[in-house]
């Protein structure tokens, strides 16, 4: 999809489990090893309209009351990036996503989005070479939590669904995020080496 040499790694998991930190640490490690790496945070800011709409819906609760619409907006944000930018990133050795396609499947199915829509959006996005699923206790942030982050029951279900997905998918591996940042980082590197992606 992107090119023969480019490997796609996605860091997934529930809210506030350390995805952004571990994505940055992975990118830094790969660059130290001499690789050319792109880090993509999802939702992708380059599609400003859908980016702002996603956060607006999360803040005012519409993500919860209109789950199918919310997942479609999320999909459009990712799909436009995929078709307009990702396909051209052939010069990179690695593209690391802080969230990608699996989040649509997990959150969409658990929040009541139409199943056919959720599966369609999942199928239309590039499958990573490896999806690392972080799981463990969520950390607290100072900024106000969005409608999904405040929903403790949803976050528990999200964690369980993510981990179950890894049990049935050879392109996914669970990594416990309860240890130190360095120990979690080492587990991610070990998983990628075990999958011959490093």
Image (cartoon, rainbow, N blue to C red):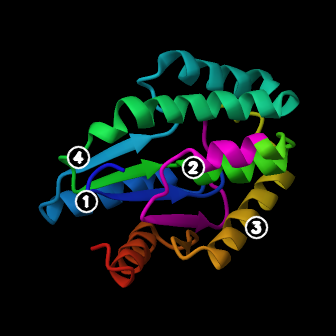
- Quickly name the residue at label 2: 101
Residue 16 shows in this picture: no
Magenta stretch holds residue 158:
no
Query: Of callouts 3 and 1, which one flags the residue occurring earlier in the amino acid sequence?
Result: 1
Secondary-structure class at tag 2: helix
Tell me the mark number nearer the camera, choosing from 3 and 1.
1
Q: Position of residue 65 (x, y in %)?
A: 87, 28
Which of the numbered marks, if any, corresponds to residue 160?
3
Dot 4, crowdedness within 10 Å: few (<14), some or many (≥20)?
some
Which of the numbered marks, if any, corresponds to residue 4?
1
Which residue shows up at 49% across the image and 56% down it? 127
Specify the segment rendered in magenta.
117-143
Where's the C terminus, which quadrant? Answer: bottom left
Q: Position of residue 138 (x, y in %)?
A: 66, 57
| 3D distance between C-alphas at marks 3 and 1 | 33 Å
Which residue shows up at 26% across the image and 53% down it? 3
- Quickly name the residue at label 4: 90
Dot 1, crowdedness within 10 Å: few (<14), some or many (≥20)?
few
């Amino acid at each position: 999809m992107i090119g023969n040499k480019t490997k796609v790694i996605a860091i997934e998991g529930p809210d506030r489990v350390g995805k952004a930190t571990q994505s940055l640490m992975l990118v830094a490690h790969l660059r130290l090893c001499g690789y050319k790496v792109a880090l993509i945070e999802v939702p992708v800011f380059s599609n400003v309209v859908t980016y702002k709409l996603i956060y607006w819906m999360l803040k005012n609760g519409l993500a919860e009351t209109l789950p199918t619409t919310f997942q479609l907006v999320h999909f459009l944000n990712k799909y436009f990036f995929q078709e307009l930018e990702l396909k051209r990133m052939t010069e990179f050795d690695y593209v690391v996503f802080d969230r990608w396609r699996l989040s649509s499947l997990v959150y969409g199915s658990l929040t009541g989005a139409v199943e056919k829509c959720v599966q369609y959006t999942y199928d239309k996005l590039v499958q990573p070479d490896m999806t690392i699923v972080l799981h463990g206790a969520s950390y607290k942030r100072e900024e106000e939590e969005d409608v999904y982050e405040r929903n403790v029951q949803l976050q528990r279900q999200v964690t369980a669904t993510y981990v179950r997905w890894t049990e049935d998918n050879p392109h996914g591996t669970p990594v416990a995020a309860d240890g130190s940042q360095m120990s979690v980082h080492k587990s991610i590197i070990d998983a990628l080496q075990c999958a011959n992606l490093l």
